[in-house]
Image (spheres, rainbow, N blue to C red):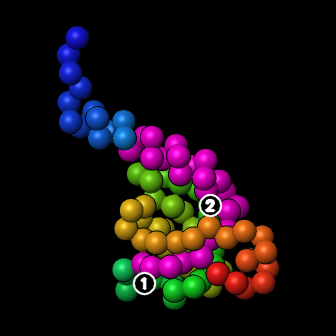
Amino acid sequence: MRKPTLNEMMEYTRQQTVERLRKRLPPGTRIVLLEMDDAQAPPIGTKGTVRGVDDMANILVDWDNGGSLNLVYGVDRYSKLNAWEDENGKV
């Protein structure tokens, strides 16, 4: 039995991350942006609705300000909102 290559192990880990994110952030989940290092980033505190998670673990978001810049998992920071926080503007 051969040992898996480093690339195979990394691919397996990435697939596990994608599956975990898809369960935690199904389409329709509301989030708020905490940090994004991008010149095109929406302002911190902008809320958005998750459209999904792609195969590279990017979180696809429709931001309430009309933008659609994706979150990069492990780089950008966000918080999942509960219904009360979303309705009352609390974060």
* Residue 63 seen from this side: no
Viewer-proximal residue, 38 or 45? 45
Q: Is residue 37 above or below residue 54?
A: below
- For label 1, the crowd category at 10 Å Cα-Cα, with few meaning under 14, some 14 to 19 and many 20 or more, is few
Q: Which residue is mark 1?
A: 40
Viewer-proximal residue, 73 or 82? 82
The image shows residue 2 at horizontal and vertical percentages of 20, 16
Disc 1, SS: loop
Q: CA distance from mark 2 to mark 1?
A: 19 Å
Where the N terminus falls, by quadrant? top left
Where the C terminus falls, by quadrant? bottom right
What amino acid type is highlighted by mark number 2?
Arg
Q: Which mark sits nearer the N-terminus, 2 or 1?
A: 1
The structure residue drawn at horizontal position 37% and vertical position 86%, both measured from the top left corner, is 39
Quadrant of residue 90 in the image? bottom right
Residue 51's mark? 2
The structure residue drawn at horizontal position 57% and vertical position 49%, both measured from the top left corner, is 22
What amino acid type is highlighted by mark number 1?
Gln
- For label 2, the crowd category at 10 Å Cα-Cα, with few meaning under 14, some 14 to 19 and many 20 or more, is some
Q: Which residues are magenta?
A: 14-36
Residue 41 placement, left or right of 7 = right
Asked if the residue under mark 1 is in contact with the one under mark 2, i.e. CB atoms within 8 Å, the reply is: no
Residue 42 placement, left or right of 9 = right
On whether residue 28 falls in the magenta region, the answer is: yes
On whether residue 42 falls in the magenta region, the answer is: no
Residue 43 placement, left or right of 5 = right
Q: Is residue 7 above or below residue 42?
A: above
The structure residue drawn at horizontal position 61% and vertical position 56%, both measured from the top left corner, is 25
Residue lying furthest top in this view? 1
* Residue 89 seen from this side: yes
Viewer-proximal residue, 59 or 91? 91
